[in-house]
Every structure is written in structure tokens, then in C-alpha cells.
Amino acid sequence: MFLLQPPQVRELELFSAMPDALRRPERSAWADANRGGAVTDSFLEGPVLDDAGNLYVSDIPWGRIFRIDVQGGWTLVAEYDGEPNGMKFMDAGTLLITDYKNGLMRLDLASGSVTPFLARRNSERFKGVNDLVFDAQGNLYFTDQGQTGLHDPTGRLYRLGRDGRLDLLVDNIPSPNGVALSPDGKLLYLAVTRGNCVWRVPLLPDGSVAKVSQFFTSYGPSGPDGLAVDAQGRLLVANPGLGYVWVLNSRAEPVEVLRGPAGASTTNLAFGGPQRSTLYVTDSTHGHVLRLPMSAPGLPLARR
């Protein structure tokens, strides 16, 4: 009889906390709809690191983008009328943002200017875009979540080609969230938050998808959110409802569980530091960024 080995459990460590001076303990339209009306002084998402090791995070309810330096110091880079979530670098000086309110937005880091990149599809607004990833050819995959869930499984996964063509790949997802690509770029992993699972999406040579399947099933009050893949091909899954990050092998077996502090909402993650061997995790409910050294580095992220 084969018995699965229990995963190693490690505790995430505090890297940096949002300074009190930057917190806004007020009601917001985003929190009214997504946090049950609770006063939410910040909600951090979208971690991504630049070549110098600076970490950028978004603050959804207040439309802010922050830079956190290697010592943990915070600088406001941009503030605008939006609800920014996932972020990836287009080039060394430009971030592309999935903005729940406005669609895809572009941030020029030098000036702090935020401008539309793709606000609508065929004159129709998105439900509420959430996360994004570039492949090695510069094609962009992004999720359109809105308020979808098991009651309304109409969330969408899009691909925006380098030539500007926008393809709707999947349109029956109950709350699509984080996206990540396998090392060979042939599979896309898709977090399905309200379904409490991760889907496996094969990417076919003609640009279509087929035989989409459920790769991993979680549990608890809120399902998988942000995703990342390491150099060994392991999938890392941030699970805010549990305060965990699952580290899954190729059979979707948890080989490590990274735990946040009590009450943590571990929403999103990114690799950084020397050789990309440190994992950074946003703890959204506390306004904290956590981190932990990993045995395998993260995959380098492609840009447009």
C-alpha cells in the first residue's frame, strides 16, 4: 500500500508592513462590494519585482501602486481612479495592470502616468479583469473574473496576441483568478477561486485550447488566488481562505505548505531576490508582504 508523505510545513516570515501613514481606514466602493462593507485600509495584490530587486504591489480599493525597496521601504509610484490587481512588466520601465474597474492599464514608472491599454472588447466592458501572464512570444493571457462564481460560471480567460488579436479561450469559469504557465509554455494553470480548485488548460499549436481539466482541489472559505511556477515545474498556489501557499508536484500532491500568520489572507505571490530564490507573498488583510527562501528558484517571467 502506498502512503502519501505529509507535506513539509513552513512559516512565512514578515518582510515589510505598509506604514500607518499610507493606510486609509475608510469605506470604499470596492470594499462595499467585495469585503462585505468592512472598512478596508488597503488590499494588496499583484506583486512583481524589477531587475534591481524592488517589489511593486497594487492596492485595489485606493487605486495605488507602491514600490518596496530591498530594505522594505515604501514609495507611492502612482495613484489614480482605478482598482488595480495583477501586474506584470511589459519592459523595464512599464507595468501592465489588470484593473477591475478599467480593464488593462499601462503604468509608466518614470512618470507615474497610468493610461488605458485595452479598456473594452468590441465596445463591451470586461466583467472585471484580475490577473495576467506573458508567454515567451509576448502573447498575453488574462482572466476576467468580475463577480462570477458557482452561481454564475461565466468568467473568462483571454489571450491577447502580439498582433493585437484578442481571443476568448474559455468562458464558463466560476471565478477565474491567477494564471501561470508551465516551463515549456504548453500548459496554463488557472486558479478558480469560487470553485476552490486549479484548472489545467492545454495550449494547442493552433492557438486553441482543449480538454481543460481540474488539476488540484482545495478547501475552505476562499479558494486559490495567485499562482507561480518554479524551475522544477512545481505549481505554487496562494490560498487566502486558509492563509496557505500550496507547493504542488506534477501530480498535484502538496509537497510543502507555507503558512501565513493567524488571520492572513495570502492572495498573490512572486519570486525575487538572488537567483529568484525568495518567494514574496501578499497578505492582503494585514497590509503585509511575507517572504520565504525556497529550494528551487522561480521561473523567469516573460515580457512583451
Image: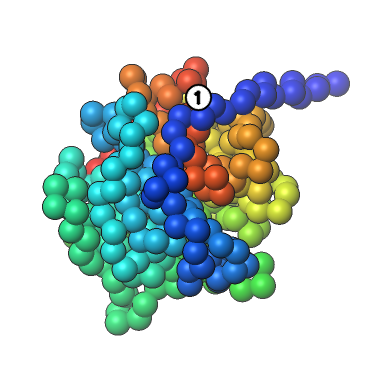
* Residue at the disc numbered 1: 292
Considering the numbered disc 1 on the image, is that residue within a helix, a strand or a loop? strand
Q: Nearer the viewer, residue 163 or 98?
A: 98
Q: Position of residue 88 (x, y in %)?
A: 31, 47
**Residue that appears at 49% across and 21% down:** 294
Q: Which image quadrant is residue 144 in?
A: bottom left
x and y, in percent, of residue 215 in the image: 61, 44
Q: Residue furthest front?
A: 21
Residue depicted at x 44% and y 45%? 20
Quadrant of res 82: bottom left
In the image, taking residue 304 as reference, residue 228 lies left or right, namely right
Relative to the observer, which residue lies in front, 34 or 74?
Answer: 74
The N terminus - image quarter: top right
Residue appearing at x 16%, y 44% in the figure: 93
Labels in figure, total: 1
Residue 227 position within the rendered picture, expressed as x and y whole percent measured from the top left: 49, 42
